[in-house]
Image (spheres, helix red, strand yellow):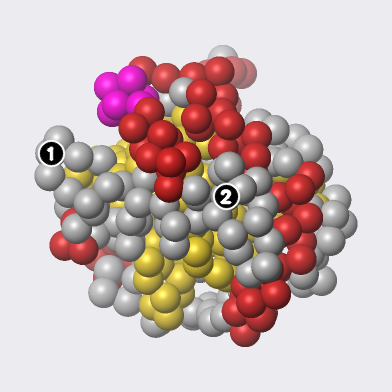
């Protein structure tokens, strides 16, 4: 048994988690409830920025596949407890724990938190099923793991916002985790790690709050094809209108936007 940073992270059984992660379907992952020491988790939950604060400092998403979410990656805007969490999850000690659990050597944290940091989703927000970008262009690193920690006290099941893990054909949701307070989910990121967040139907005065970080290696994973890609979205089986109409229209809109931008630059 391990008592990692007893002041912050609860006692965890690394060997047990490693066994669970290796055999987990549809791709390697593990979930821990009561991940952080209760006092520390409460401290973070109480200090989590309000929606109006995050809206001023973060990036908001309004696309077909990702809507109603705001993220803050600049740690200068993090309250002290979240800064502490960020430092812990980027520490060499925690990286060694992840390496042992997930069987990946030489993990690295991203100091810039590209795509990570504070995430907040309001009512009717969602994140469709996708695989993440596989290569960090600025750092020249291969993306290997996601960690998600939730800070939603008294979250109700009907409010949705579950993180879902799907099979590689995106035909069946294999695992679904409600974003309850102090739940941690870690999973491998590769070309079949399809995951998404169901629509959030919380009350108007509530938000779905989480912290996300991603881990990398200099060495490519065994399945590396040599082709970097950005986020790839897939519609769920019951999302035919989105699949056949809304997603193609959005793709066309982005292409037109890029074309217009190039034309103006050369005008």
At mark 2, the secondary structure is: loop
Q: Position of residue 54 (x, y in %)?
A: 36, 25
Query: Which residue occupies the extreme top position in the image?
Result: 267
**Residue 18 percent coordinates (x, y):** 68, 74
According to the image, label 1 marks what residue? Answer: 204
> Is residue 260 visible in this depiction of the protein?
no
Whether the magenta-drawn stretch holds residue 176 is answered as no
Question: Is the residue 258 above or below the residue 195 in the image?
Answer: above
Where does label 2 land, which residue? 9
In depth, the one of 28 and 237 nearer the eye is: 28
- Residue 72 in picture, x, y percent from top left: 47, 29
Which residue sits at x=25%, y=40%? 207
Q: Residues within 10 Å of mark 2 (few under 14, many from 20)?
A: many
Stretch in magenta:
49-54
Secondary element type, mark 1: loop
Question: Where is residue 13, by image quadrant?
Answer: bottom right
Instruction: Please give the name of the residue rendered at 38% of the width and 40% of the height, measured from the top-left corner.
Output: 42
Q: Quadrant of residue 208?
A: top left
Q: Left or right: where does residue 105 sit relative to residue 248? A: right
User: On the image, which quarter does residue 102 sit in?
Assistant: bottom right
Q: Nearer the viewer, mark 2 or mark 1?
A: 2
For marks 2 and 1, give the CA distance: 32 Å
- What x and y, as percent, mark residue 2? 68, 61
């Amino acid at each position: 048994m391990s008592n990692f940073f007893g002041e912050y992270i609860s006692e965890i059984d690394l060997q047990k988690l490693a066994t669970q992660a290796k055999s987990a379907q549809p791709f390697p992952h593990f979930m821990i409830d009561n991940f952080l020491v209760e006092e520390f988790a409460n401290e973070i939950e109480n200090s989590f920025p309000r929606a109006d604060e995050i809206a001023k400092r973060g990036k908001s998403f309004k696309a077909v596949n990702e809507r109603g979410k705001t993220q803050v990656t600049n740690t200068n805007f993090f309250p002290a407890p979240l800064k502490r969490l960020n430092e812990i999850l980027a520490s060499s000690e925690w990286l060694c724990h992840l390496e042992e659990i997930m069987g990946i050597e030489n993990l690295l944290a991203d100091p810039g938190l590209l795509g990570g940091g504070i995430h907040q989703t309001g009512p009717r927000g969602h994140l469709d099923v996708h695989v993440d970008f596989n290569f960090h262009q600025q750092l020249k690193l291969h993306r290997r793991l996601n960690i998600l920690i939730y800070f939603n006290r008294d979250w109700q099941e009907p409010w949705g916002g579950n993180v879902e893990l799907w099979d590689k054909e995106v035909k069946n949701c294999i695992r679904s985790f409600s974003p309850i307070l102090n739940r941690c989910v870690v999973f491998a990121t590769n070309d079949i790690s399809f995951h998404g967040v169901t629509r959030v139907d919380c009350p108007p005065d509530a938000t779905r709050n989480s912290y996300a970080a991603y881990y990398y290696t200099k060495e490519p994973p065994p399945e590396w094809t040599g082709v970097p890609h950005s986020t790839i979205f897939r519609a769920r089986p019951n999302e035919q209108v989105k699949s056949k109409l809304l997603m193609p229209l959005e793709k066309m809109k982005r292409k037109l936007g890029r074309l217009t931008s190039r034309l103006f630059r050369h005008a």
